Amino acid sequence: MASDQGNDQTAGRILVVEDEVFIAMEIERALMNGGFEVLGPVGSIKDALQLLHREQPDAAVLDVTLRDGKVTPIAVLLRSQGVPFVLASAEGRELTETGFFQGVTNLGKPTDMPRMIEEVRRLLN
């Protein structure tokens, strides 16, 4: 997206859903340094769904286990809107080998921020 101020451009709007404040801040900072506009971060299903009713992200970085449950309702909504996402979860590999999250990249925790930026850019291409 281009802004009205000179050459300022963002590479895309990225929703961050993470309930651990310091991790959320680290993800936000890395994405902003990578040229992205960050939506959130939000730390609950409720807050994420409210945000998604107001804003349309280009992609998302999702933690799987939030304080109010699993991120699945958010992922379902994103998928129905055609919004790609990656996971940043401490949950094991089996999470992405079967079921709803099959084939989705799980960056793990602690998250390698340069790899996260690469994966988000890949989602947007």
Image (cartoon, helix red, strand yellow):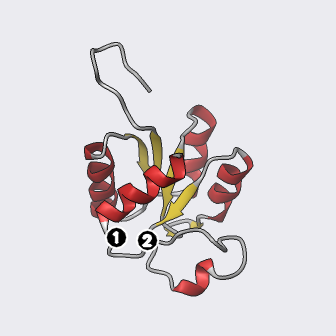
Coordinates of residue 86 in the picture (x, y in percent) = 52, 62
Task: Write down the quadrant of residue 5 in the picture.
Answer: top left
Identified at 25% across, 45% down, the residue is: 33
Identified at 42% across, 45% down, the residue is: 40
Mark 2 Cα shell of 10 Å, populated few (<14), some (14-19), many (≥20): many
Classify mark 2: helix, strand or loop: loop
Q: Which residue is mark 2?
A: 107
Q: Which residue is farthest front?
A: 125
Q: Work out whether 7 lies above or below 20.
A: above
Task: Write down the quadrant of residue 12 in the picture.
Answer: top left
Residue 111 is labelled as: 1
> What residue type is disc 1 on?
Thr
Identified at 61% across, 47% down, the residue is: 49
Classify mark 1: helix, strand or loop: loop
Q: State yes or no: discs 2 and 1 in contact (Cβ < 8 Å).
A: yes
Coordinates of residue 41 in the picture (x, y in percent) = 40, 49
Q: Work out whether 59 lies above or below 8.
A: below
Coordinates of residue 19 in the picture (x, y in percent) = 42, 62
> What residue type is disc 2 on?
Leu
* 105 left or right of 11 in image: right
Q: In the depicted view, which residue is nearer to us: 75 or 4?
A: 4
The CA span between labels 2 and 1 is 6 Å
Q: Work out whether 104 lies above or below 75.
A: below
Please state, as top left, top right, bottom left or bottom right, where the N terminus lies in the image: top left
Q: Is residue 87 visible?
A: yes
Q: Work out whether 80 lies above or below 113.
A: above
